[in-house]
Amino acid sequence: MAVCIAVIAKENYPLYIRSVPTQNELKFHYTVHTSLDVVEEKISAVGKAMADQRELYLGLLYPTEDYKVYGYVTNSKMFRKLHNSFTDVMCNPFYNPGDTIQSKAFDGMVSAMMVQAS
Amino acid sequence: MSVPDYMQCAEDHQTVLVVVQPVGIVPEDQFFRIYKRIASVAQVSIRDSQRNLYIRYRHHYLPENNDWGDFQTHRKVVGLICVTTCGSGKEWPQTSERFHGQKEVFGATLYDSRLLVFGLQGEIAEQQRTDVAFYPSYDDCPDVEKKVEDFVESIFIVLESKRLDRATDKSGDKIPLLCVPFEKKDFVGLDTDSRHYKKRCQGRMRKHVGDLCLQAGMLQDALVHYHMAVELLRSVNDFLWLGAALEGLCSASVIFHYPGGTAGKAAGRNPSAAQGQAADAGKRHRPGAQEVLIDPGALTTNGISADTSSEIGRAKNCLSPEDIIEKYKEAISYYGKYKNAGVIELEACVKAVRVLAIQKRAMEASEFLQNAVYINLGQLSEEEKIQRYSILSELYYLIGFHRKSAFFKRVAAMQCVAPTIPEPGWRACYKLLLETLPGYSLSLDPKDFSKGAHRGWAAVQMRLLHELVYASRRMGNPGLSVRHLSFLLQTMLDFLSDQEKKEVTQSLENYTSKCPGGMEVITLPDGLRLHPVPFTKLPIVRSVKLLDLPVSLRPHKQKGLMENSMSTKSPFIYSPIIMHNRGEERNKKIDFQWVQGDVCEVQLMVYNPMPFELRVENMGLLTSGVEFESLPAALSLPAESGLYPVTLVGVPRTAGNITVNGYHTSVFGVTSDCLLDSLTSVRTSGCLVEVIPSLPRLQLSTSLPRSAHPLQPSKEELSSSVSVQLFNGETQQLTITLENIGSEDLETLEITSKISNTKERLFGEFLIRLDFSGGENLLQDLMTVNGISVTGLPISSPLRQVLKPRAETRPPGSESSKTDYNHVKMLEAVMTFKYSGGAGKVEGYYRDLTLGLHVDVEPSVFFTRVSTLPATSTRQCHLLLDVFNSTEHELTVSAQNNQDLVLHASECQRMAIQVDKFDFDTLPQPDQETVRYTSLKLLEEERLHAQASMINSTLGITWDIISFGEASVEGVLNQLVLDHLQLAPLQWDVMVNGKPCDCDIIADCKVGDAVPLEVKLTNRSKNTVGPFALTVVPFQDYQNGVQNYDLQDAVTFIGSNTFYIDTVNPSEESLCLGALLFLYSGDFYLNIKFQDDSVGKEPGAGQGKELPLSWFGLPSIHIRAQEAPMEAGA
């Protein structure tokens, strides 16, 4: 299960970020932030011609000592759920693309995906 | 070997290492000057062989690293240059000794050494020694470079000989086993004769020769040797050396593929060397290639293996770029097997990353770096840790991972101030933190944040800013802390929680108490400029609106001049094309003016986004264009207030166009200048306004209290207004005081008035008369003395009621009329004081001061009916007035020469007033001009009005309730009454005994005397009258109704008793003279009758036919005849 889930806008700022060990949230911020380098690299590496058929799964972005950071995945159930939920958020007419996500439904779905904090 | 050289790169493998060190006491700056000059000789072209030798200089090198020189020859110190100061010959032996001592440190590996002696002159300096050079001073050493080149050449000779020596070792000779320091103990007691051991020795030696070839500039040879070494070592599983051989292969290939070097920006360390490299880049690998071409069989002659070289094709000798990385990976994996080779592994990783960076293969590079992070070098000092993190950051930056780079830089920064360090390096920490800013897409210029959505990762940025604040504070630079904290507050406001907002502002206040924040640009020692942070969000300004001056102070342009300015604007009166340009909106000129010297206002709508009360101090306007004195305001905004209007004021001191650029505030001790240009969210209707030269300022006060009562059709704004309640006919004195409170002299003052009550006007029933006498000398007073009170502006509302003749037909006191009278009328008038003066007058501006007058008129006294009765004299008549008191009070009505009449509420009484008849002809005639332009009806009305007012003034009817008032009969007069009140145009004067005789005057005469009788006719009418025949008939009145006309015995006419008067022209007189003789005493009356001779002779006929009867009202004459006194005396 995941310890931290973040949705990042295309301008590389967080739309949503949540982690389970809340006491050291900033560490996760840093982890996610630095793994964006890899995302950027992977996306730019594929090139513009391939943009349409680009594999959404970016795989392992960045392994740290304690955790592994994965990029966007659609072939696992977990990420499909996140994707669907994100799509729902985007479909909300009152949501302004670019704003941080405050949807309760999204929040609930993310919670279900997280490690249950004891 | 524990200290890695993070700056290493693949091409360092082809360099030879020379250590430059000071010996004895050498000033540091002088040493580094010399070191720089020495280091500039980084590449030496060897004269005969077309080969290049590359030199790496170090001024500090650990001898224990030197022990790894066999493993990789570029780690071996082969040259030593010592720099020393020697003042005198006496010190020379000691210096020389030191030099030798230094040589011994690296003794085993040195090929050659040099000593540069500065300061020594004389005998010793004269001696020619190859290893020592003498210079008189640090400034006088022109051939240092030359010496170093010679030195390098000598090193090359040794290197070349070594290479040839090793390469041509006979196979029969025993090849020594090269090994790294930690291996030595492993080989104790090993069987040196085994095939395995021999192969190992061969392999290691091959690798060593490869290294030497590379250093000597024979690239292709080196490649061949490395390939063979790899083969040999792989077969004996000598992994450490296999790794080294592979790395050597990689290095040689890199040098081949990337002649520009892989060091990236590190090359900048030595610009001259970099230039040299670039220039030689083309031919750089050629020497090696040539070598192979010239002597392809040279390798076969070497003794290790005669036939290995031919197995490897020349083309394949060099690795492809992909292979380089593969081989690096392999090499690193082999190094990884040895704990003691951590430094080698780390350096290999760094080198590989640099190569990958050139190849732009960031992902793979990051894997190498990831690996490097986990290489454990045992206990590292704090400084080494910082160095390591910094270099990781640099490498990540190199491959384009800016975030990762920033992360490690931040870690390095934190390491600088780790709690374990006794003296934390806050300065270094701060510097490193600043370098991380781009990685977090954070710019310290607040302008970058003003537009669009927030960029970057707010949570992380906030953290970084906090750290910057803390670091700068610990550095002892509170100014920086304030700046950073202001920046944090300004840019991250949306992301701060309420609690954080409180904390941040509190600490900001703490800092500013020591060092107030300002608007100046802070320049850091390294050249970074910290732009000022204006608090545009504390408070947030939503709109800026320039306000017009209050109505009474608004300047107006003189009409004529206005047209001029209009015409210059555009030749078209109307154009359907309206320029829609939103950008110009701010620069649009506003269509009102401000006046120099007068307080001008700008209204801002602000709100406080903070969860606590916000105190904004010293808030004022920023303007340009004219000199402007801003009067700052302080305000306190409640927590999370809604929009809140704030008015900022200031006084323009000069005339011209003023632009409001923004505002300045002081919040939490930080002063900020917020410019509107950078605030896109601010709505404004224009910021440019014209300031006209100063004008005087009048202040108006009235003796009556001001009223908030607005005039009914409030079409125009009034500066002030007065309201008063009056009875019809009452007079109220109103004193208007004008005070010039401005700084300019008043030069002109115009007073006009107009009645604005249009509704009442429709009926045409009321008139208001405002008498502005005394206005002329008023001006003089104002110019000399400020604030003189001017009295004598009686505003009387005598409200003549012009009830039309129908009033006559209306029964007095009828219901309908009563309601009409009881109706309270409203009168409104506006007085306008137009004044100007000073410089503003020259420009054609003036100001208006308006005073609204509101009068509620209550009905007082009405005349319901008027009639006349003839009086005894023809010059007089009685006027009968039915007076009606429509008030609820008892009132007293009085007229001139008449007793008072007390009227109770709603009472109607008749009063009779004896009046002299009026001569309306004396009234001024309207001049020709007016006659021409007004209708006959109007002229008639005018005439009637004039007559009525004459009657009024004569009557002088006043009433008295609580206050005095006057009443007017104007409305009730009709033609008949007027006719009666008018003096006949024919004026008759009768003189008896030379005395004028009228009704009640008794003329005395004596019996027996002739009494002269004179009848004078004055024609005042406009027509000629006559001829007339007058007959004088005497009679006696017995006072009992009997009149005796039979007096032929008592009275005798001397002459005729009938006079004939000819035609009398207008304004002429005609006189008839006669005489009477009274024969008896008694009272006699004379009745003068006359006939109009023009019509007929019979008396009375035609009388009044042509001329009204009233014209012929002749006085009756009373004569008392008495006995002559002499009779009494007789």
Image: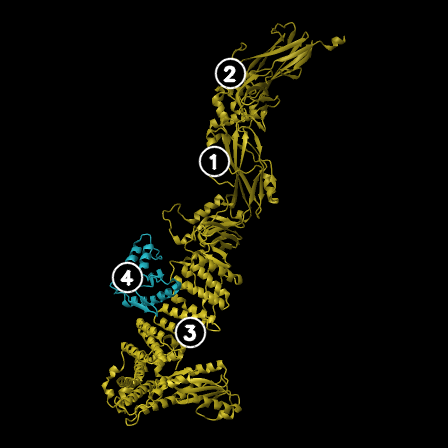
Helix, strand or loop at mark 3? helix
Residue under label 4: A78
**Residue B141 appears in the rendering:** no
Q: Colour of chain B?
A: yellow
Helix, strand or loop at mark 1? loop
Q: In the rendered image, which quarter contains the C terminus of chain B?
A: top right
**Chain of the residue under the numbered disc 2 shown in the image:** B
Left or right, B576 with respect to B25, comes to left
Residue under label 3: B386
Residue B902 image position (x, y, % from top left): 59, 22
At label 1, the amino acid type is Gln
Residue under label 2: B1106
Out of B422 and B696, give the one closest to the viewer. Answer: B422
Q: In which quarter of the image is residue B362?
A: bottom left
Residue under label 1: B712
Out of B86 and B1087, give the one closest to the viewer. Answer: B86
Out of B181 and B1067, give the one closest to the viewer. Answer: B181
Do the numbered discs 3 and 1 sit on residues whose CB atoms are within 8 Å? no
User: From what the image shows, is residue B958 above or below residue A72?
Assistant: above
Q: Do labels 4 and 3 share a chain?
A: no
